[in-house]
Image (cartoon, rainbow, N blue to C red):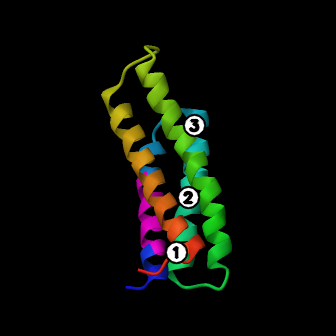
Amino acid sequence: MDADQLAGTLIGTGGILGLAGTISTFFPFSVLGVLSFGLVLVFGVLIYRKRPEARLVAAATLWFAPLGGVACATVLWFNRSGWFHVALCDVQGSVGLFGMGLALVGAVIEHRGIRV
């Protein structure tokens, strides 16, 4: 597996985990998270297929992954602040943030041209 495939796999996995973490949360945050992590998933597929615009797509991932992560962090904040407490929101927010981290690692690998 070369660096492009590794980066694409990490970004795609991060997008899937991010979708799993935000798909059933509260309305404005679920829309933000689903759109952002949906794009991250598409970016991962494009990078995995070794497209010529892979570095540009990796740069876009560096924007959209944290944007989706904001939705996950907001869900965790609402859950911890005492407004309400749902145990599933802790799991969903954590999974989404982990997905964001994976996507960012993959984007840095691709954008910086790190060879593994």
Instruction: Identify the residue at horizontal 56%, vertical 61% (top origin).
Output: 40
Q: Would you identify the image quadrant in which residue 47 lies? A: bottom right
- Give the labeled residue for mark 2: 38
Q: Residues within 10 Å of mark 3 (few under 14, many from 20)?
A: many
Depth check: 38 or 51 in front? 51
Residue 94: x and y in percent read 38, 41
- Give the labeled residue for mark 3: 29
Residue 10 magenta:
yes
- Element on which disc 3 rests: helix
Residue type, mark 3 in image: Phe
Residue 77: x and y in percent read 48, 26
- Element on which disc 2 rests: helix
Residue 91 appears left or right of 38: left
Q: Are marks 1 and 3 in contact (CB under 8 Å)?
A: no
Disc 3 from disc 2: Cα separation: 14 Å
Residue type, mark 2 in image: Gly
Instruction: Point out the image quarter for the C terminus.
Output: bottom left
Residue 39: x and y in percent read 60, 61
Residue type, mark 1 in image: Val
Disc 1 from disc 3: Cα separation: 24 Å
Q: Bounds of the magenta span? A: 7-17
- Give the labeled residue for mark 1: 45
Magenta stretch: dominant SS?
Answer: helix
Instruction: Identify the residue at horizontal 50%, vertical 76% (top origin).
Output: 114
Instruction: Identify the residue at horizontal 41%, vertical 63% (top origin).
Output: 13
Residue 16 appears left or right of 49: left
Instruction: Identify the residue at horizontal 37%, vertical 85% (top origin).
Output: 1
Circle nearer the N terminus (1, 3): 3
Circle nearer the N terminus (1, 2): 2
Q: Residues within 10 Å of mark 2 (few under 14, many from 20)?
A: many
Q: Would you identify the image quadrant in which residue 80 lies? A: top left
Depth check: 45 or 106 in front? 106
